[in-house]
Amino acid sequence: MKTNNVPAHASRSEQNGADNLAQVRDYYERTWLDYRLLWLNPQNRALHFGYWDANTKSHAESLLNMNQVLANRIGIQPGQRILDAGCGVGGTSIWLAKRYNAQVVGITPVADQIERARRYAREQGVDERVSFEQQDYTSTDFPDASFDIVVAMESVCHAPIKNRFLAEARRILRPGGRLGITEYMLTRPAGNAAERQLLNSWLSGWAIPNLATGEEWNAMPSESGFADAQLENITANVRPSLQRLYRFARLSWIFAVALRAMRVRSETQHDNTRAARDQYRALERGLWFEGMLTATA
């Protein structure tokens, strides 16, 4: 299990990584109420955006649909051993166990999420097929070649150095194993100070240290030993979900400012609302897109 305890001789990179994990923990612990009230429900427990197609009828359905679309792209088979890297409160892990009779391990650095995920798995009757551990997905304690599948649903954004996640995923995947992620990816670098400020407002509010470009994501899998990498821009299918969050943030902004001024909501909670607003503004500027990446070990 990874901790925040960093020895005095640790490198700057290690210290930055530990600081980043602390920010991620703080963000998810303090914003849980927002997610619980506005986003997920007991059937999906999803902290990611949804996937809309011609048959999608509701927000809740779109969240499960994102799981199914990624599973289809990877080609998940019943009974496989799957790592859910950045599992949140276990929504995708539980769905995979139920849908594919899979053996799933979910990992997250956030202790509160582990406790909730374990409880939800028991409630859904899959706790014998799903386990949850507090680990850093860039440096796990799993043996080499111990998983058939690694999935990461909008979680690699929290890694300061994205290819460290890819290298670790490659290490723990069996030969021929499959990787599948959904992620925010830069379309292009910010072109001016206003765009840089907009991106920073979004990313800092969600404890995201940086984003890689789509071009970088195209190159990184092969550099980490993967083959057959396929990157798909799924923004059109995700846009209704993004718009939903933006509407919530825009309509609640005046109240958010007032509640922050009265210290009813913390700075982290306030920043979360601001980021929900500005992620869509950055999308409209053409600064980023939602990507789905698959590759073979």
Image (cartoon, rainbow, N blue to C red):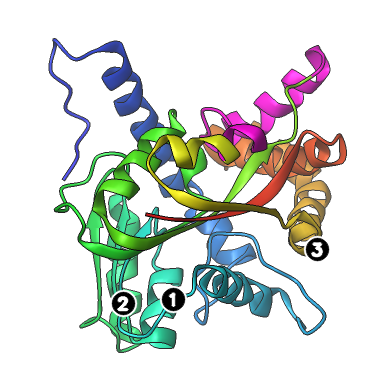
Q: Which residue is mark 1?
A: 76
Q: Which mark is residue 80?
A: 2
Q: Is residue 89 visible?
A: yes
The residue sitting at 68% across, 74% down in the picture is: 62
- Any magenta on residue 202? yes
Secondary structure of residue under mark 1? loop
Q: Judge depth for marks 3 and 2 and give the one in front.
A: 2
- Judge by depth and name the residue closer to the eye, 252 or 226: 226
Label 1 neighbourhood size at 10 Å, few (<14), some (14-19), many (20+)? many
Q: Which residues are magenta?
A: 191-217
Q: Nearer the viewer, residue 194 or 238?
A: 238
Provide residue 147's location: percent of width, then percent of height.
Answer: 26, 63
In contact (CB < 8 Å): disc 3 and disc 1 = no
- Does 182 sit above or below residue 262? below
Q: Nearer the viewer, residue 242 or 34?
A: 242
| Amino acid type, label 1 | Ile
Disc 3 versus disc 2: distance between alpha carbons?
A: 32 Å
Q: Amino acid at mark 2?
A: Gln
Question: Does residue 197 sit above or below 91 in this rendering?
Answer: above
Residue for badge 3: 240
Q: CA distance from mark 2 to mark 1?
A: 7 Å
Query: The residue tagged with tag 3: helix, strand or loop?
Result: helix
User: Which of the 4 quarters of the picture holds residue 234?
Assistant: bottom right
The answer to the question of whether label 2 and label 1 lie on touching residues, with beta carbons closer than 8 A, is yes
Q: Dot 3 surroundings within 10 Å: few (below 14), some, or many (20 or more)?
A: some
Dot 2 falls on a residue whose secondary structure is: loop
| Apparent side of residue 212 relative to residue 274 in the rendered image (left or right) | left
Q: Residue furthest right?
A: 284
Residue drawn 21% across and 57% down? 145
Magenta highlight: main SS: helix
Residue 32 inside the magenta-drawn segment = no
